[in-house]
Amino acid sequence: MEDEIINKVANSILVVFDLEDYYPTGIRTQIDISQWLFDGFLLKEKDFRSELKKHDWSQYQDQYVAINCSTDAIVPAWASILVAIQLAPFAKKIINGTLEDLDASLYEELLSEIDYSVYENKSIIIKGCSRKPVPMRAYVLAAQYLQRFARSIMYGEACSAVPLYKSPGR
């Protein structure tokens, strides 16, 4: 008589928390302020303002936009703010930083709106492999929210999860 193979992972009580499920769809764009600086390093206010007026801001319609400067230029704070003001009528969201900072900011908003009480006393595995650019900050934030409710938290895949947290009272 053959022994039946039992898939213990499929039959487990683990609840998978997959950050990809919350990945906001939409185009992400990075605007590099250095394109409007003299030699990429020097901000000449009159020229800078003139270049911003000529720029077609409508191309960022409904996009998520990160504003940064890729050079080592010392850029006054008002420059990024001025770019953001130009973008505001068109973009869905604007941040100062990189595309990873933008994704982290989007996740911060989304994760703060989830009802985590559904994870009360559950064993959670935060899915580790993703095909989308989920920033590490999103994993850290998700773990903090889940910790308030979960019996235990692991990270990775069910077949090779790393234990992170076990509630002392549950």
Image (cartoon, rainbow, N blue to C red):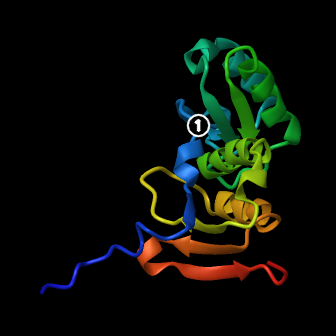
Asked if residue 7 lies left or right of residue 68, the reply is left
As drawn, the residue found furthest toward the left would be: 1
Q: For label 1, count other residues whose C-alpha is less than 10 Å away and answer few (under 14), some (14-19) or many (20+).
A: few
Q: Is residue 42 visible?
A: no
Quarter of the image for residue 16 reads: bottom right
Q: Which residue is depicted at the point 20% across and 85% down?
A: 3
Secondary structure found at label 1: loop
Of 72 and 121, which appears nearest the observer? 121
The N terminus lies in quadrant:
bottom left
Q: Which picture quadrant has residue 92?
A: top right
Q: Which residue is mark 1?
A: 24
Q: Amino acid at mark 1?
A: Pro
Write the residue at 73% across / 24% down. 47
Q: Which residue is found at the position 77% from the left and 68% from the top? A: 147
Q: On the picture, is 66 further left or further right than 131? A: right
Q: Residue 73: x percent and y percent?
A: 72, 50
80 left or right of 153? Answer: right
Q: Position of residue 144 (x, y in %)?
A: 78, 65
